[in-house]
Image (cartoon, rainbow, N blue to C red):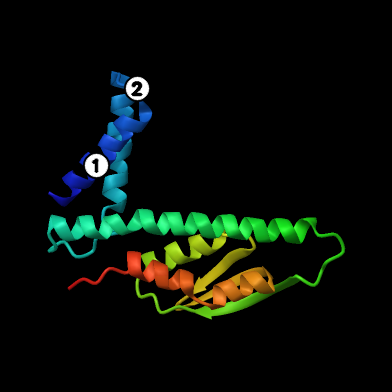
Amino acid sequence: MYRIVIFSLLFGIWVVFSGLIDIFHLTLGFIACLFITLISSDFYFTNRSKGLGNRLTEIAKIPGYLLWLLWEIILSNIHILKLALTPGDIKGLDPSLIRVKTDLKTDYGKYILANSITLTPGTITIDIDGDELLIHSISRHTKMGVEEEIMEQKVSNVFEIEDS
């Protein structure tokens, strides 16, 4: 039943966004959504005993995280742009590798955190080793942003769902 709901949601989104209602595109969408459902249906919801209301509450947190992440990406773009366009100012540059310990429990949460860090200009997640992330940072400003662990807290609130 769970996979049917996931498939139906994916296929509905496919139909809306493709804008093409013909046999070829519907078949292609059907196959793609079926494949995605089969390989990824366990990624987000590990506890299947929760009701639909709880699931909708969990899903409703994702757009807020994405908007926050978009804002962080914009701010980091501005910071990197200032670094690039300020002639002769190398004081702001401080490329370094830092190891950050994470309290995230799931691989999925760590994956989301690593990708969010990499999407933010000025930082790249190089490696995840257990509970540690190896991150390259281009400046003191971006290094402080990673060390403050605000992004980890946001990821934890949205993607580290309690399975009670």
Which residue bears the numbered disc 2? 20
Q: Secondary structure at mark 2?
A: loop
Amino acid type for the residue under numbered disc 2: Leu
Residue at x 30%, y 21% (from the top left corner): 21
The quadrant where residue 15 appears:
top left
> Do tag 2 and tag 1 residues touch (Cβ < 8 Å)?
no
Q: Quadrant of residue 122?
A: bottom right
Specify which label sits upstream in the sequence, 2 or 1: 1
2 on left or right of 99:
left
In depth, the one of 86 and 22 nearer the eye is 86
The CA distance from mark 2 to mark 1 is 17 Å
Q: Is residue 132 above or below residue 159?
A: below
Mark 2 Cα within 10 Å, few/some/many (few <14, many 20+)? few
Going by the numbered disc 1, the residue's amino acid type is Leu
Please indicate, yes or no, whether residue 43 appears anywhere in the rendered image.
no
Residue sitting at x 71%, y 55%: 81
Give the quadrant of the C terminus.
bottom left
Please state if 126 lies on the left or on the right of 89 as rendered: left
Element class at badge 1: helix
**Few, some or many C-alpha atoms within 10 Å of disc 1 (few <14, some 14-19, many ≥20)?**
few
User: x%, y% of residue 84?
Assistant: 77, 57
Considering every residue shown, the one lying at the far right of the view is: 88
Residue 57 is situated, as x and y percent measured from the top left of the image, at 23, 59
Q: Which residue corresponds to mark 1?
A: 9
Where in the figure is residue 136, as x and y percent of width and height?
Answer: 64, 69
